[in-house]
Image (spheres, helix red, strand yellow):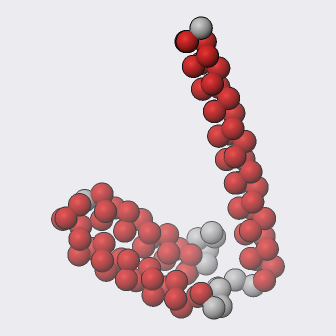
Amino acid sequence: MPTSVPACAQARELTAAVTGAVAEGDAGRTDRAAAAQNLWALRDRYAAEPPFAPEQITAILAAMSGILGEIYEAEKAAVGRLKELVVARTS
């Protein structure tokens, strides 16, 4: 998501805050709850009408598709390599 769009930048910041607070355990409970509440409010605000033009949404989805394809290929190669190592070790 483009950080040049304020709502996207805010969503990233809130997601990082939730993640960081989760890592803190009980000590982060208050921060986690506040960040999560703000993140849900942001989601609700833009759920019906995203902060993007239709062509931006198309471009974002196309970019995400390409990235997911690359991740899939990398994971597939990793599984293949792991299989080779396991077979070599058990032979």
User: Most extreme residue toward the left, as rendered?
Assistant: 27
Left of 71 or right of it: where is 40?
A: left
Q: Residue at x 70, y 54 (%)?
A: 68
| Circle count | 0
Q: Tell which of 44 and 5 is nearer to you.
A: 44
Left of 2 or right of it: where is 45?
A: left
Q: Position of residue 83 (x, y in %)?
A: 63, 25
Q: Residue at x 76, y 55 (%)?
A: 66
Q: Residue at x 23, y 75 (%)?
A: 30
Residue 64 sits in quarter: bottom right
Left of 70 or right of it: where is 8?
A: left
User: Most extreme residue toward the top, as rendered?
Assistant: 91
Q: Residue at x 65, y 86 (%)?
A: 50
- Quarter of the image with the N terminus is bottom right
Q: Tell which of 29 and 79 is nearer to you.
A: 79
Residue 19 sits in quarter: bottom left
User: Most extreme residue toward the front, as rendered?
Assistant: 91
- Quarter of the image with the C terminus is top right
Q: With respect to residue 83, does 33 lie above or below?
A: below
Q: Position of residue 73 (x, y in %)?
A: 72, 42
